[in-house]
Image (cartoon, helix red, strand yellow):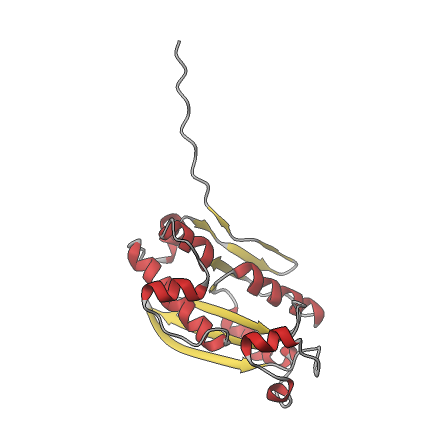
Amino acid sequence: MDFITLDFETATAERDSPCEIGLTFVRNGQIADTLAWLIKPNSYPYFNSWNIAIHGIKPKDVQHSPTFDQVWQELRPMLQNQLIIAHNASFDMSVLRATLNTYGLPFPELNYACSVQFSKQVWQGLPQYDLKSLCNRHGIQFKHHRAAADSYACAELTLRALAHTNCSCLDDFPEKLKINFGQLFEGGYKASSVKKTPKPKRAFPF
């Protein structure tokens, strides 16, 4: 079971303003590595104060960091043809798409899944499904709202979901976690989704 968990932090409310990306690599069902890159966003030197309050990254922290198109030269080979998992993937994948569009870069080919979506299927009935609440429930300690730590926490959470459902291979992932993979491909994307359970047919008396 190999996959990569991904997390973005952004400088502003605009999706094409990533200031940090974190990746955690899971190989053969074990966390192998976590990497993070600070990014000089296209909004530099402007950072929204609300975003700074969340992640603590300031303009001075990225003053000498590469821009996204420079970082992407290293990232693309890592992500191409992989399964990417993010907590609230609709946000993180929209950051990726918007930023690629801003820099005129083609989308990579990859599948992705949302750990919020499959957590709701695996652990039904919980009051909250944000990353911090789920990690607290499972005893996963991390520094929230930094990209490396959040991607690592997402990987730990995903491994617990796989263990809980006895899922040991990618082919079984959608069925056991009851989700449909999203896709990114050159020229477009398909959103991830929850598998719908067929409603039982009603029996009508003759």
> What residue sits 38% from the left and 70% below the top?
26
User: Front-most of 91 and 72?
Assistant: 91
Please say whether residue 72 is visible from this viewpoint.
no
- Tell me if I can see residue 7 in this picture: yes
What residue appears at the point 41 percent right and 15 percent down from the top-left corner?
Answer: 204
On screen, residue 206 above or below 154: above
Q: Which quadrant, please, contains the C terminus?
A: top left
Q: Looking at the picture, how far across and down is residue 94, in whole percent? A: 61, 62
At x 52% / y 53%, what residue is drawn? 192
**Left or right: where 94 falls relative to 155:** right
| Residue 171 picture location, percent across and down | 38, 53
33, 17: nearer the viewer: 17
Q: Position of residue 194 (x, y in %)?
A: 47, 48
Quarter holding the N terminus? Answer: bottom left
The quarter of the displayed image where residue 149 is located: bottom left
Q: Residue 83, image x and y in percent?
A: 46, 62
Query: Position of 50 compared to 143: left or right?
Result: right
Q: Nearer the viewer, residue 169 or 201?
A: 201
As drawn, 175 above or below 16: above
